[in-house]
Image: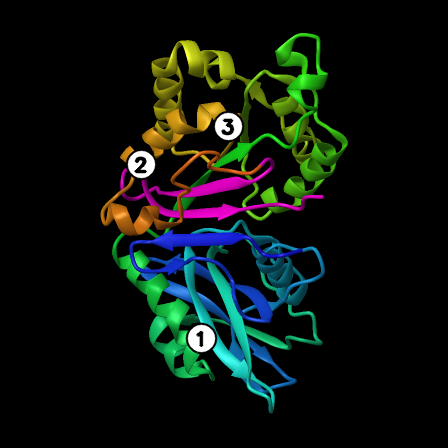
């Protein structure tokens, strides 16, 4: 599957992956008192100290890969947090370009267990020790971004995820009530793909337009996670058309809760939602918003926008990510 992805913070912007070799990883972090600590891994194959990371599996998105690799290598189940800078270098005699996309991940509640094959040791280190221990200079790039975020109180975040419902049956072929128009066969497959993508952030509050195509889009995720969901008419097409202020007001209220959230809605509702999202950005607004779609249709069916809210900075938005899922 082609990787359609973009990320932006105040400090960097990834427009899209371009290297023939793609990998993803995580910088696990925790705080001990006021001190920031990071979890560094030792790889016996290379005899180096690095971060949990690995190449993408077929059909896998970059966020899915990052979450999977940290679980497979050291047994941690993490929710992706703030995006960190991508590292770029060449591998092999031919000098093949490679990119590794990174995310921060808070990891204080579980104990790492090395798989014994790719990773034989892990160690929590201070930032100073980690700088010295990391074997490859490029691995210090995401570390320095993580340190800066901790200093600026933007490291501890909650994701607010906006999902456009998956592909629905065409309006032209549907003669019954519009709010009952279901997903097409392609849309049902997209809903299964986005279920896996959403697992990288694991949002715990699920909100959806009451229209059937939105409910069907979030159903695979809520079934997997055994979470409920709330239907809100403020995010329906009808409300956005007739009472757009109501849609914007509800969006502002949801952002104000600063909670890990998934919102599934429609293309015509996106302009109202995104206007509120823009107002919630911290500083360096243009830089943070670089990955935000700027024109209609904003998102393809089944695609997502992930806005990370900094919990120690009043819930202001400090990063934007966009991802498309599989399509026919």
Q: Which mark is residue 278?
A: 2
Provide residue 318's location: percent of width, then percent of height.
33, 47
Tell me if 195 is positioned left or right of 32 in this view: right
Which region is colored magenta? Answer: 301-328
Q: Which mark is residue 267?
A: 3
- Secondary structure at badge 3 equals helix
Earlier in the chain: of badge 2 and badge 3, it is 3
Provide residue 81's location: percent of width, then percent of height.
45, 51
Q: Residues within 10 Å of mark 2 (few under 14, many from 20)?
A: some
Q: Which residue lies at the image location 68% right of the left edge and 39% below the top edge?
A: 190
Q: Which residue is mark 1?
A: 139
Contact between labelled residues 2 and 1, with CB atoms less than 8 Å apart = no
Answer with the quarter of the image where residue 112 lies: bottom right
Earlier in the chain: of badge 1 and badge 2, it is 1
Q: Residue extending furthest right?
A: 185
Can see residue 34? no
- Secondary structure at badge 2 equals helix
* Residue 118, placed above or below residue 163: below
Q: Residue extending furthest left?
A: 283
- In magenta stretch: residue 34: no
| Distance between the alpha carbons at the discs numbered 1 and 2 | 32 Å
Answer with the quarter of the image where residue 35 lies: bottom left
């Amino acid at each position: 599957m082609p990787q359609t992805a973009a990320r932006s913070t105040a400090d960097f912007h990834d427009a899209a992956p371009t290297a023939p070799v793609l990998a993803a990883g995580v910088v696990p972090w925790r705080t001990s008192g006021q001190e920031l600590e990071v979890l560094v891994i030792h790889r016996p194959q290379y005899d180096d100290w690095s971060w949990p990371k690995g190449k993408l599996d077929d059909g896998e998105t970059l966020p899915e890969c990052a979450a999977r690799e940290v679980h497979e290598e050291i047994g941690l189940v993490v929710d992706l947090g703030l995006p960190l800078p991508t590292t770029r270098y060449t591998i092999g005699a031919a000098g093949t370009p490679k990119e590794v996309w990174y995310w921060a991940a808070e990891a204080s509640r579980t104990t790492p267990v090395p798989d014994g094959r790719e990773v034989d040791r892990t160690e929590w280190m201070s930032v100073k020790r980690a700088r010295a221990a990391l074997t490859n200079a490029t691995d210090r790039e995401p570390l320095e971004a993580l340190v800066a975020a901790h200093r600026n109180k933007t490291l501890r975040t909650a994701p607010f995820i906006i999902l456009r419902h998956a592909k629905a049956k065409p309006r032209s072929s549907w003669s019954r009530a519009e709010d009952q128009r279901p997903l097409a066969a392609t849309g049902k497959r997209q809903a299964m793909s986005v279920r896996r993508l959403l697992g990288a952030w694991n949002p715990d509050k699920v909100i959806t337009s009451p229209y059937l195509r939105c409910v069907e889009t979030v159903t695979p995720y809520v079934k997997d996670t055994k979470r409920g969901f709330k239907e809100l008419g403020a995010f329906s097409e009808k409300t956005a058309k007739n009472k757009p202020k109501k849609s914007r007001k509800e969006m502002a209220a949801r952002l104000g809760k600063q909670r890990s959230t998934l919102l599934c809605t429609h293309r015509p509702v996106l302009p109202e939602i995104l206007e509120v999202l823009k107002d919630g950005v911290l500083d360096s607004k243009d830089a943070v918003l670089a990955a935000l779609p700027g024109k209609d249709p904003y998102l393809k069916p089944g695609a997502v926008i992930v806005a990370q809210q900094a919990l120690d900075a009043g819930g202001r938005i400090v990063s934007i990510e966009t991802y498309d899922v599989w399509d026919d």
